[in-house]
């Protein structure tokens, strides 16, 4: 049997929309069949009468009174609803949603943030060019983290940007530093107190991260790191962003030296880029993976790897413990069948650097992302007998899965296989810290090792691309690895050299 | 902001995509704003390609120029309520057996219940049939012709039925000399705009024709009309958005009319008229609608302009017109409003979205001016003042400009978003938000609630394709 409960508040007015909303809220309470809050005008009283919620109390309400009319399944429900209604009427009857108001489009974003000067685009690749175009139209510089942007779109966007004195960083630009601020996947340099006088131009990602980290360890500091994307130096794109970046950095009085970190440029592009660099008026260091000293044009200092580049830029050197006697010590622990180095990388540029370092030591290498003289690891015949250096962040490993820098667990299978393979002598791992990276990348590695006794496993060497002010903390990550018996090297290049020395001792 | 300034001052970032990158920047004290980015809402590849074409290069520049001209015409409009005339006198060719209705063109058999009910009522009112039964039969024959209000310089709320003997308010856009028409609001309860058609409904319509219409006409002629632009400005600062809430503007126009009305009318009639107007908070809605039509009509044919010049619904289909496509209609099935219901009614009773009143959103009021009217935001769900602001700001993402004269105090006097751009709708996937009354799906019952509804994306998809084709051909 339904109960009708009415309450009249004399001389109480509230906007009808607020009342309708409150009515709907109360009608949704348990045991409430109908709930109506209305001002007691004759027409409203008629509506309430028709809805079967009015009793003698409500019928006596006047046009300046509020009627709370309920039909409930019993007194208990009605009283609960009445209490709720009265409580809501005391406080604000309407509450805004708590979430921060966000714009859906760049145009809307700019109206909320008119001082913005950069759009950081990380949408799926097929939408990135469109967003980049709107950003340029709106007068914003653009950093495209997304990959899968067509070469044609990349070239057009960069030309448009240049015509407007804007710059496009990327596509596939994972890392940048602008006036000391790290963007996307980048390490914090906030603990570095020396003046930032170095600027870098890099294709993307971990090459720039490793350089920034090593520079900071050597007492230097990075002012700008402009990521231009992996294809900018190709003849197809013609180094549009790189050339712009050189001009920008050359005109920056706080910058004393410029470091180029890249793959070899296209034949036509190389000349223009190196001429501009050589005549820019600053000290220039180039770490071009695959270049020999003799390939480097005059006026530009040659760095064979990122460690060399950081040493040249900082004027300091890592205190060389030398690979001996550590290498022979480690070699003694390798089991009799162990001969191979396996590198399991999350950073693409680090994977390249290791292949070249091993080749320099006279070793044969194979990779899914071959650099230098590496065989293609997909071809088992060619790869047989080579040291295997894998880029686990390459497309074939990341389809439908997160990148190993964001989710270290995707490296676990390959790591476990290598641990159980008696022919593996050394495993090299990179552990990338910083913004964007996993909150505790060492954990997955250490957990795998907990099932493998130190005496029955290959030597494991890790390099940590990270700084003390990174969110993960360098010291905590290093301690976790060394506690698990992992050798932690100062640099990726150092890790590769140590690994090479170990296998050379073994054989 | 040039690349030079970016390096010198450091980044201030708008994040398009991953939220984490923006959070990282904020944690370092860098000014960064994340978008609520989403992939395009449309699945229509042809329309997406058309929108892309319209948004790039020289085509885009040409459209921007045309749209600037459209905004110039919209913002220089000077709408004045000047007269009330019989529909037969105001509208050329409106005679026997012609019935005007809301929305894009529609045939009798496709009309929803309330619209058929209103048609039958109008047929009885005009004496073309003796009773409602006969009227329903007559309406189904080819003796009755149906045409949209929009084809005759007119608009009408909900069913929007207009026939020859109804009095229409006349708004003249003094800047361009064009005139637009809308019926007088009948009030709440059982009314023809919600499909009501019984004797009480027809009796009220006869009173409008015989008494209120002529008195309003005399009043307006005697006071030389009432300028509407300023009334809207003041109404916005008093909490109206002119679709769901017209209480301030109704009061303001009553203040304008009353002194002259008292001079030109006999006391009993004036008392009756003022009581009628004062008793209907939505009286001004129909004035705002005629004004909207008068503002948008001069924008109707600017080559290359992607600005929407009309939005309306006939209870079955939603239709839009776009300046660069002239008088072509782009239609898609109407959506169901989401809202709050009067006691005793639920969404099961609701009729799909209906009426020409969306002309007020077309000029930047209604859902677009929600921030001016936090009370109305309650219809939007968990709506408070902050949500109302969000709605208005979101509409600014799909419009060309802000109206410099119609400003919103809560937005630090930013103007209402003005000039809906079909390209921006397609590219963002944001469709116009409309504040609307909800009619009962059966004729004759009336309003059962109020809420919000969105214009269907399909209209904008077709319009983008058509505009792109027109520009390619020219």
Image (tube, rainbow, N blue to C red):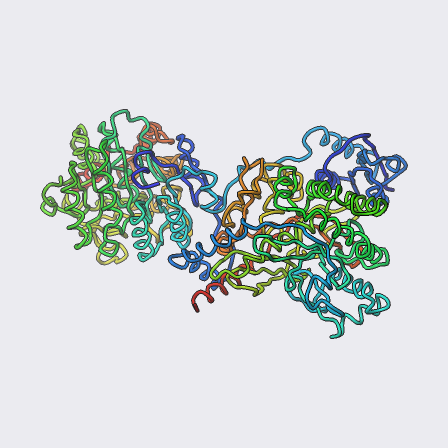
Q: Can you give x and y, in whole percent of width and height, for residue A252 in the image? A: 23, 35
A208 relative to B438 in the view: left or right? left
Q: In this view, does B292 lie above or below A250?
A: below
The quadrant holding residue A325 is top left
Return the x and y of residue B196 as percentages of the image width and height: 80, 57
Q: Which residue lies furthest to the bottom in this view?
A: B142
Q: In this view, does A451 lie above or below B192?
A: above
Query: In which quadrant is the N terminus of chain A drawn?
Result: top right
* Foreground of the two, A169 or B178: B178
Of residue A383 and residue A210, the one placed in the foreground of this image is: A210
Looking at the rendering, which quadrant does residue A260 occupy? top left
Residue A56: where, in percent of width, then height? 90, 37
Question: Can the viewer see residue B412 in this picture?
Answer: yes
Q: Which residue is farthest right?
A: A56
Q: In this view, does B204 lie to the left or right of A505?
A: right
Q: Which residue is drawn at 44% across and 55% down?
A: B65
Closer-to-camera residue (A175/A317): A175
Position of residue B455 measured from the top left corner of the image (x, y, whole percent): 60, 55
| Side of A150 relative to A366 (left or right) | right
- Note whether residue A450 is visible: no
- Look at the image and tell me in which quarter the C terminus of chain A lies: top left
Number of dots carrying numbers: 0
B112 relative to A226 in the view: left or right? right
């Amino acid at each position: 049997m339904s109960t009708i409960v009415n309450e009249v508040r004399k001389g109480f007015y509230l906007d009808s929309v607020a009342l309708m909303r409150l009515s709907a809220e109360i009608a949704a309470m348990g045991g409430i069949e109908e709930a109506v809050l209305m001002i007691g005008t004759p027409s409203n009283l008629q509506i309430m009468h028709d809805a079967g919620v009015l009793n003698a109390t409500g019928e006596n309400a006047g046009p300046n009174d509020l009627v709370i009319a309920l039909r409930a399944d019993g007194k208990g429900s009605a009283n609960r609803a009445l209490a709720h209604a009265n409580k809501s009427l005391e406080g604000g009857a309407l509450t805004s949603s708590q979430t921060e108001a966000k714009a859906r489009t760049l145009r809307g974003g700019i109206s909320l943030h008119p001082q913005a000067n950069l759009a950081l685009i990380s949408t799926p690749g097929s939408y990135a060019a469109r967003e980049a175009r709107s950003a340029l139209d709106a007068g914003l510089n653009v950093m495209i983290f997304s990959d899968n942007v067509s070469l044609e779109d990349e070239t057009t966007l960069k030309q448009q940007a240049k015509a407007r004195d804007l710059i496009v960083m990327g596509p596939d630009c994972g890392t940048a530093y602008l006036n000391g601020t790290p963007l996307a996947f980048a390490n914090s340099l906030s603990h570095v107190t020396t003046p930032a006088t170095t600027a870098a131009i890099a294709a993307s990602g971990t090459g720039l991260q490793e350089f920034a980290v090593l520079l900071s360890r050597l007492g230097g500091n990075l002012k700008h790191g402009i990521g231009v994307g992996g294809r900018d130096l190709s003849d197809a794109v013609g180094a549009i962003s790189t050339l712009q970046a050189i001009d920008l950095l050359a005109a920056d009085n706080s910058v004393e030296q410029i470091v180029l970190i890249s793959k070899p440029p296209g034949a036509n592009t190389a000349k223009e880029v190196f001429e501009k660099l050589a005549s820019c008026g600053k000290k220039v260091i180039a770490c071009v993976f695959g270049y020999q000293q003799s390939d480097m044009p005059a006026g530009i200092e040659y760095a064979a790897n990122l460690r060399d580049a950081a040493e040249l830029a900082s004027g300091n050197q890592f205190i060389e413990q030398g690979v001996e006697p550590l290498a022979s010590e480690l070699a003694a622990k390798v089991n009799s069948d162990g001969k191979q180095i396996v590198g399991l990388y999350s950073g693409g540029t680090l994977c390249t650097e290791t292949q070249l370092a091993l080749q320099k030591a006279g070793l044969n290498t194979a990779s899914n992302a071959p650099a230098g003289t590496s065989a293609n690891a997909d071809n088992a015949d060619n790869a047989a007998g080579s040291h295997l250096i894998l880029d686990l962040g390459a497309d074939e490993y990341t389809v439908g899965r997160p990148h190993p820098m964001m989710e270290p667990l995707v490296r676990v299978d390959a790591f476990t296989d290598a641990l159980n393979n008696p022919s593996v002598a050394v495993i090299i791992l990179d552990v990338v810290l910083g913004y964007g990276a996993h909150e505790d990348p060492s954990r997955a590695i250490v957990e795998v090792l907990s099932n493998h006794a130190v005496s029955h496993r290959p030597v494991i060497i890790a390099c940590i691309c990270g700084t003390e002010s990174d969110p993960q903390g360098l010291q905590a990550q290093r301690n976790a690895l060394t506690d698990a018996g992992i050798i932690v090297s100062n640099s990726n290049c150092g890790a590769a050299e140590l690994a090479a020395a170990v296998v050379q001792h073994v054989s | 902001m040039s690349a030079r300034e970016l390096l010198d001052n450091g980044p201030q970032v708008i994040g398009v995509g991953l939220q984490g990158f923006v959070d990282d920047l904020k944690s370092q004290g860098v000014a960064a704003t994340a978008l609520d980015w989403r992939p395009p809402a449309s699945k229509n590849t042809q329309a997406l390609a058309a929108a892309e074409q319209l948004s790039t290069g020289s085509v885009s520049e040409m459209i921007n120029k045309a749209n600037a001209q459209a905004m110039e015409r919209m913002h220089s409009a000077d709408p004045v309520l000047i007269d009330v005339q019989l529909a037969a006198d105001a509208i050329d060719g409106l005679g026997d057996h012609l019935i005007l209705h809301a929305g894009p063109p529609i045939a009798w058999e496709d009309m929803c219940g309330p619209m058929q009910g209103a048609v039958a009522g109008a047929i009885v009112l005009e004496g073309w049939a003796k009773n409602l039964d006969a009227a329903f039969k007559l309406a189904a024959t080819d003796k009755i012709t149906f045409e949209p209000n929009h084809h005759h310089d007119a608009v009408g709320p909900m069913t929007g039925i207009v026939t020859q003997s109804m009095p229409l308010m006349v708004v003249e856009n003094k800047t361009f000399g064009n005139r637009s028409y809308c019926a007088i609001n009948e009030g709440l309860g059982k009314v023809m705009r919600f499909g009501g058609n019984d004797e009480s409904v027809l009796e009220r319509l006869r009173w409008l024709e015989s008494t209120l219409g002529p008195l309003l006409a005399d009043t307006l002629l005697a006071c030389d009309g009432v300028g509407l632009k300023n009334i809207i400005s003041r109404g916005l600062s008093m909490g109206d958005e002119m679709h769901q809430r017209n209480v301030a503007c109704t009061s303001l126009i009553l203040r304008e009319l009353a002194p002259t009305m008292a001079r030109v009318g006999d006391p009993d009639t004036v008392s009756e008229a003022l009581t009628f107007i004062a008793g209907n908070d939505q009286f001004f809605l129909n004035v705002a609608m005629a004004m909207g039509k008068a503002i948008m009509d001069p924008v109707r044919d600017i080559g290359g302009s992607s600005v929407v010049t009309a939005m309306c619904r006939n209870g079955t289909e939603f239709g839009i017109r776009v300046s660069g496509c002239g008088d072509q209609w782009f239609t898609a099935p109407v959506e169901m409003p989401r809202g709050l219901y009067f006691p005793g009614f639920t969404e099961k009773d609701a009729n799909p979205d209906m009426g020409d009143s969306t002309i007020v959103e077309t000029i930047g009021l209604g859902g677009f001016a929600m921030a001016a009217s936090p009370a109305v935001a309650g219809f939007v769900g968990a709506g408070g003042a902050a949500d109302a602001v969000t709605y208005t700001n979101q509409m600014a993402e799909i419009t060309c400009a802000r109206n410099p004269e119609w400003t919103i105090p809560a937005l630090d006097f930013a103007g209402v978003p003005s000039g809906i751009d079909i390209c921006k709708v397609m590219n963002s996937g944001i469709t116009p938000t409309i504040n609307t009354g909800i009619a009962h799906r059966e004729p004759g019952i009336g309003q059962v609630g109020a809420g919000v509804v969105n214009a269907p994306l399909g209209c904008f998809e077709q319009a983008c394709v058509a505009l792109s084709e027109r520009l390619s051909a020219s």
